[in-house]
Amino acid sequence: MILGMPYRYRYFPEVEAQKDWGLFVTCAGRGRTNPGAEFPSHEHPDEYYFTWERGRVLGEWQISLVEEGRGEAEIGERHFELGPGSLLVLAPGVWHRYRPDPRTGWSSCWAGFGGDMAGRLVRGAGFGGEGGFHSVAEAPARALFNSAVADILSDGTTRPYAAAARLHTLLAELAEVSRGGESRARREEIVRRAQTLLAEKCGETIDLDALAASLGLPYRTFRHVFTSECGMPPHRWQLRMRLERAKRLLESSDIPVAEIAELLGFRSAWHFAHFFQRETGTSATRYRAARAADRPRKT
């Protein structure tokens, strides 16, 4: 069951003096979406409302934290699976969409902000300039996010500078989380080594506990590091590699589909066909035919 309260959110008018100050809050909200409920609701202003089918592009930064439940998101061409502790950083001008799993719903909180300082703070926190997915596994950091949003909801209209300062503190705390624990270089090394092994053994079933141990980490820590860097857990990343290799084999060879399924470690041609159809929206046979038709013919 998803804990929390129905959504409470506010949108704040831009104040010219705050623009000169360098940071201002545009909106904030927190609460829950129950399983199967409409998301987002039609109560949001037109410039913020979106549907999964068309997504949206914002003119400001937003940070959004999933506290409980599950869902998914797409930012540009990147797809992310979301769960407790998933943090979405949405950049201005970048297309995105996200939604809770209708089976679980979710509890979440978010804040929007702008100003000359906004992008520098986000990049300084280690979140990049195009936005993306990050993991905030530590319970105190997640509680801090919720508390900061609650304060912004209370102070955003009457004390806009205090609300902006609270947001600044929140970004600073998130920066500490994102840069704490394993050093960035060490995290990147772990992920590169894991990706290399998963790619080399693309068609094999990998013992992920043993893989984590070979990298000197317990599995839960390894999964957290990998997911925060790649936007998906290691088993899902390997499936993506299988899909990409399947596409290349279908495009560049005449290997029968059943043999491709065996090469990539699927239990049967049926399982491969089901996986390929689910991931691409078309069958492997039709994909091969379409790519063959697209190739230039020799004259």
Image (cartoon, helix red, strand yellow):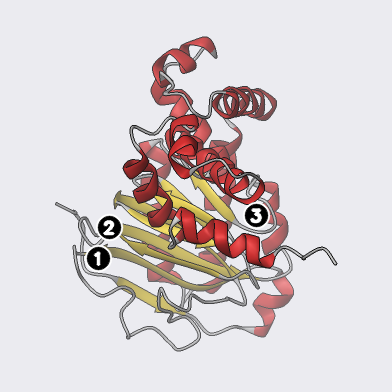
Q: Identify the residue at image location x=32%, y=85%.
A: 42
Q: Identify the residue at image location x=57%, y=54%.
A: 132
Give left or right: position of 114 versus 216: right
Residue 267 location (% of width, % of height): 33, 32
Label 3 vs 2, first from the N-terminus: 2
Residue 91, placed above or below residue 243: below
Q: Nearer the viewer, residue 207 or 89?
A: 207
Q: Nearer the viewer, residue 154 or 241?
A: 241
Q: Are marks 1 and 2 in contact (CB under 8 Å)?
A: yes
Residue 271 location (% of width, % of height): 33, 42
Q: Secondary structure at mark 1?
A: strand
Q: Label 2: which residue? A: 106
Mark 3 residue type: Val
**Can residue 173 be seen here?**
no
Q: Label 3: which residue? A: 122
Distance between mark 1 and mark 3 Cα atoms: 27 Å
Residue 123, placed above or below residue 47: above
